[in-house]
Amino acid sequence: MEVERKTRIKLFATDLDRTLVDDSGRISAFTEKTIRKCMDEGFLFTFATGRQASAMWRLRDVIPVNAPAICSNGSEIVDVFTGKVYHRETVSSDFVLEFVEFCLANSIDFDCRADKFECANIKCVYLPVMLRRQKEALAAGREPQGIFYIHNVNELPPAGEYVKLLAWTPNNEILLKVREFCDRFPEVTTTSSVKGLLEIAPAGNSKGSGVMHLCEVLGLNKDEICVFGDYINDLPMFRAAGMSVAVGNADDEVKKKATFVTSSNNEDGVANAVLRICSGEFG
């Protein structure tokens, strides 16, 4: 396999879940080899994810990257190897209090994510994942992310820089109420990366704003950026980049907005698209 360089693109930025990684949560040997070949040829490669920066240590040795990562849906731009923060915005503590109070009053699962800890209701559907990640950190000799179980707002830590808040419910009507609640506060914005989940970030932040911040950091213009995604939270970065690619399993609306559609995440969609782009097929 040879990677050519017949394109204006200099940076590839990809969503992770259901885009770069397959349904088992892995990347294939072919995809990894393709990315490494691209980096050897001088291309930049990174990811744009809803996951917070403090969780990226799990991926940095598995998914090859050589540029700062867009994390927390654009609220953070971080070098996953050195920990250097190029950009970070946080949700106001006043809103966090209102949000937690609302979720507790309506029996809605929530998770408030700060750099060193998370706060969630005791029956949060995401709790098993949080506990698993604690064990992974301990096994790797790292300090685990703290978990605070919240029964009332007075149990929230007195100080916390929250980069992302989450609300889960399988009930679409209740999820709409959460969105309507958040819409009352101009200091936050909402998006979603999967059905049944609402993600809350500081206003003005999205994967699109993350792409623009990363362009400033790297001295690139939008026409030199190609992004990959599968869901509606990826659309802002589709608009911010010169080229956008939807994987074959992407939401129909995402496919409509993409420059082109590649194969699915289970069929090396990102790697196949990268090879086509590098060959000059799309300029």
Image (cartoon, helix red, strand yellow):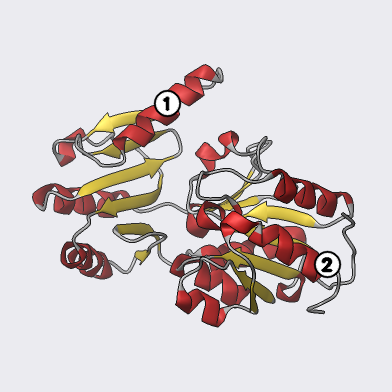
The disc labelled 2 sits on which kind of residue?
Cys
> Which residue does the image show at 57% across and 34% down from the upper left?
58
* Front-lying residue, 105 or 158: 105
Q: Residues within 10 Å of mark 1 (few under 14, many from 20)?
A: some
Q: Is residue 14 left or right of residue 5?
A: left
Query: Residue 122, labelled with which disc?
Result: none
* Front-lying residue, 157 or 151: 151
Disc 2 secondary structure class: helix
Query: Which residue bears the numbered disc 2?
Result: 278
Could you tell me which quadrant the C terminus lies in?
bottom right
Question: Residue 281, how many percent across, how many down?
Answer: 81, 77
Above-or-below relation of 95 to 155 = below
Question: Residue 64, how many percent across, how many down?
Answer: 71, 44
> Which residue does the image show at 59% across and 34% down from the upper left?
57
Disc 1 secondary structure class: helix
Query: Which residue bears the numbered disc 1?
Result: 134
* Front-lying residue, 33 or 150: 33
> Which residue does the image show at 26% across and 42% down from the upper left?
125
| Farthest front residue in view | 267
Q: Residues within 10 Å of mark 2 (few under 14, many from 20)?
A: many
The disc labelled 1 sits on which kind of residue?
Gln
> Which residue does the image show at 76% across and 51% down from the upper left?
35
